[in-house]
Amino acid sequence: MGAIIVIAASTGGLEPLRKIVTALPAACSASVFIVWHTGRHPSILPDILNMTSHLPVLHGEDGHPIEAGHIYVAPPDEHMYLDRGVIRLDHGAKVNFTRPAADPLFISAAETYGERVVGIVLSGYDSDGADGLAKIKDQGGIALVQKPEDAEQPAMPWAAIMADHPDACLPVKEIAARVAGLC
């Protein structure tokens, strides 16, 4: 299994997500996990991303084995965690006022996969992803943040920058190229 890529996005994050997913080559050995703040509303994000992705995109399922070259989206109203080789879901308390939230995913990825993790915080409100991104960096992983000036809603990127010094603060096009290079 290759890199573990975890991505947080909210308001203004759809187009950045599309650009990153589209940049991933068909032979990508990474496993990608996305938390997009949908709350309990139905999510068609996998359908939208499958339109341009070279990799299969699906909602994560509890107990499902993690497969290289797949993109997993947190389902509505469920936190997604990574355990050794499997996805875990739960309907626990909201984190950063939302469920699904990025911090549970990011922290579990960092604790389970350490330096193999690449964390990315994209456009959105509030501070979700900031603590998790700091944990990823603390465990030897790579921390990337969408350049706030490039984000439709810069609160999440700014929070991530203030929580810890990310490895890079880049426009989405450069994040996409960097992530594609990890495949």
Image (cartoon, rainbow, N blue to C red):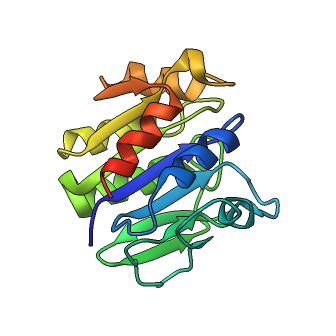
- Image quadrant where one finds the C terminus: bottom left
Left or right position of 12 against 82: right
Please give the name of the residue rendered at 27% of the width and 41% of the height, measured from the top-left corner: 142
Q: Tell me if 149 is positioned left or right of 168 in this view.
A: right
Residue 4 vs 103, above or below: the answer is below
**Nearer to the camera, 63 or 180:** 180
Q: Residue furthest top?
A: 149
When the figure is inspected, residue 24 is found, relative to residue 149, above or below; the finding is below
* Up-down relation of residue 153 to residue 124 (above or below): above
**Residue 132 in view in this figure:** no
- Residue 44: image location, x then y, percent: 77, 64
Q: Could you say which is closer to the camera, residue 83 or residue 73?
A: 73
Q: Name the one closer to the observer, 181 or 65.
A: 181
- The residue lying at 41 percent from left, 41 percent from top is 177
The answer to whether residue 44 is seen in the rendering is: yes
Give me the residue at 52% from left, 47% from top.
20
Residue 121 against residue 39 in the figure, above or below: above
| x and y percentages locating residue 57 in the rendered image | 59, 69
Residue 116 location in percent, x, y? 23, 56
